[in-house]
Image (spheres, grey):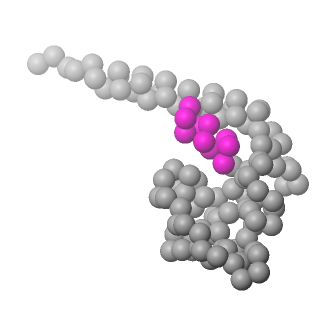
Amino acid sequence: MPQSSQAPARMSYFMSFLTCLGLLVVVLSVLFWANFSPDFVAFSNDAPVGAVNASARAVPGVLTGVWQDLNWVGGPEPIPAPNLSMLIRLIAKGAGLELNRIYAPASLLIVG
């Protein structure tokens, strides 16, 4: 019975994927070098820092509902959709500056 050559081909595909992923991580690390500094966030213009750091938008509590009380009495906001952005927020442990530091590089890494 002849042996199949699928195992070496599969390993070659896996090594190519890891090489490409490693190169992409290196390129993104160079482009987003400023995000490694704790005092600086690159590429973030979402909202004022107070709105970004509001406890009402902290994950995972935001998945059950949001009452934004930054202005006087406040008001309800829609629940965010469960998508890749929400997964990145869960990994970043909520909203705020941590999310702003990893959101753009993580999005570019997923898009590839």
Query: Which residues make up the magenta segment?
Result: 103-112
Q: Quadrant of residue 67?
A: bottom right
From this viewpoint, is residue 80 visible? yes
Q: Quadrant of the N terminus?
A: top left
Placement of 63 over or under 7, stated as above or below: below
Placement of 61 over or under 29, stated as above or below: below
Residue at 64% over, 65% down? 94
From this viewpoint, is residue 35 visible? no
Q: Residue furthest left?
A: 1
Residue 6 percent location from the top left of the image: 28, 23
Q: Quadrant of residue 77?
A: bottom right
Query: Is residue 109 in the magenta section?
Result: yes
Q: Quadrant of residue 39?
A: bottom right
Main SS, magenta region, reads helix
Q: Along the horizontal axis of the image, is 52 left or right of 82?
A: right
Query: Is residue 41 in the magenta section?
Result: no
Residue 90 percent location from the top left of the image: 57, 61
Residue at 81% over, 61% down? 49
Residue 33 percent location from the top left of the image: 80, 39
Q: Nearer the viewer, residue 80 or 35?
A: 80
